[in-house]
Each structure stands twice: as C-alpha cells, then as structure tokens.
Amino acid sequence: MKNASKKLGLNVSDLMGKTTNMFKEITQLNLRNERILLRRIAQDLEFMDRDVGMSKREFDRFVIRVPEKYHSFLKSLKFEDYAGSDNKLDM
C-alpha cells in the first residue's frame, strides 16, 4: 500500500479514502443498474396482454425473468394482496 501511495503522491490514509469512495460509487452504480434492469423487465412484460398494469400471468413471468437473487422474495408475495380491483398491479 505504501509503495502504491508513494507512486501516486498520496499518503496511505488518502489512498484508503479514495479506494473506499470508489467502492461506494461502484456499489451505487450497480444498484442503479439493477433498478433499471428490473424496470425494463417489468415494462417488457406489462403490455403482453396489451393492457396497462401487470396481470398475474405477466407477474409470474416477471418473477422468472428477474435475477435469481430476487426469486425467493418475489415468490413469497401473494399477487392478490397487491393487485387492484382489476386484478392488475399498477406499474
């Protein structure tokens, strides 16, 4: 670490701070990209039946298409608890 910080003209604590900030920025970027991916999948599926809102069938397909880390959470939800009187999720 000391060698790297000397080459960059920084002290070790500055280098550690910059590294920590870089990892925070990468984490935020990854979260933003995941949100975009989830919204894109939802948008792609919402209009399969040409109606606004996500039907139970569309939601089931959404659960299958999202990254695996979300499967258990989404499968634990009851569609009917979140759907409106039209049996659709408002997106």
Image: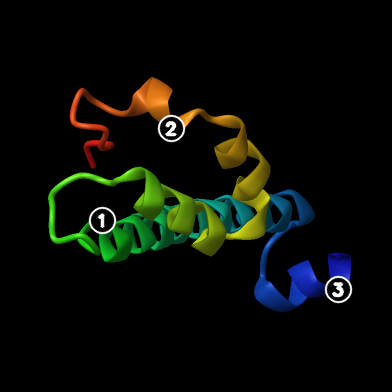
The colour scheme used here is rainbow
For marks 2 and 1, the one nearer the N-term is 1
The residue beneath circle 3 is 3
Q: Residues within 10 Å of mark 1 (few under 14, many from 20)?
A: many
Q: Quadrant of the N terminus?
A: bottom right
Label 1: state its secondary structure: helix
At which x and y percent is residue 30?
52, 59
Q: Amino acid at mark 3?
A: Asn
Label 3: state its secondary structure: helix
Q: In the rendered structure, find residue 31 and report the number of the disc placed on it.
A: none
Residue extending furthest toward the bottom: 7
Q: Residues within 10 Å of mark 2 (few under 14, many from 20)?
A: some
The residue beneath circle 1 is 46
For marks 2 and 3, the one nearer the N-term is 3
At which x and y percent is residue 17?
65, 49
Marks 1 and 3: which is nearer the front? 1
At which x and y percent is residue 54?
28, 46
In screen coordinates, is 85 left or right of 68?
Answer: left
Give me the C-alpha separation between circle 2 and circle 3. Answer: 56 Å
Label 2: state its secondary structure: helix
Q: Amino acid at mark 1?
A: Glu
